[in-house]
Image: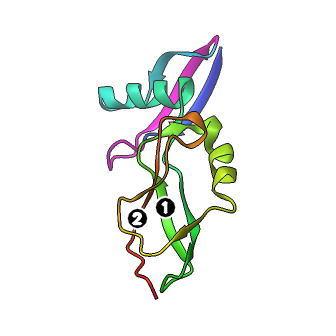
Amino acid sequence: MEKVNMTCIICPKGCELTAEIENGKVVEVFGNTCARGLTYAQNEIENPIRTLTSSVSVRNGVHPRVSVKTDREIPKGKMMECAKALKGVEVEAPVRIGDVLIENVVGTGANIVATIHIDKK
């Protein structure tokens, strides 16, 4: 049986977890002080997801780049593919917080949205 150590990040306690894994599935978790630690370990081992943050170029803006993120978590295994999809993307100013700049990035169901305002020059 494989053992994986991790720190739970669901709450500020930061419990040190040890997950026992068999055939890619979590069978037991030790070190958690609440049920959320078990859920965290299961998700992190069996289906890790992340929010991608990055930036893209802006034409005719007061700033040359706009910070962006996915509007939902995506599979960790798709992070690099999503990041590569942003390379060369350029949007026209003005850009507003929440503007969808790319829909359904690399088939994840997540959209790339602006996280700041960029006004036109």
Residue kind at label 1, given as amino acid type: Val
Quadrant housing residue 114: bottom left
- What secondary structure is found at the residue carrying circle 2? loop
Q: Position of residue 7 (x, y in %)?
A: 48, 42
**Where are the magenta residues, as a range?**
9-23
Work out whether 51 lies above or below 64.
above
SS state under label 1:
strand
**Residue 36: image location, x then y, percent:** 33, 30
Rendered view: 31 above or below 27:
below
> How many residues crowd around disc 2 within 10 Å: few (fewer than 14), some, or many (20 or more)?
many
The picture places residue 1, in percent across and down from the top left corner, at 65, 13
Q: Nearer the viewer, residue 77 or 91?
A: 91
What residue sits 48% from the left and 33% below the top? Answer: 17
Which corner quadrant of the image does residue 108 belong to? top right
Disc 1: which residue = 68
Please tell me which residue is depicted at 56% across the width and 27% down the height of the picture: 45
Could you tell whether 63 is left or right of 21 in the image?
left
Q: First in sequence, mark 1 or 2: give its number.
A: 1
- Residue corresponding to mark 2: 115
Q: Is residue 26 or residue 61 the one in the foreground?
A: 61
Is the Cβ of the residue at disc 1 closer than 8 Å to that at disc 2? yes
With 15 as the anchor, is 44 left or right in this view?
A: right
Is residue 15 located in the magenta-colored stretch of the structure?
Answer: yes
Residue 47 location in percent, x, y?
53, 26
Residue occupying the point 68% across, 44% down: 81
Q: Is residue 22 magenta?
A: yes
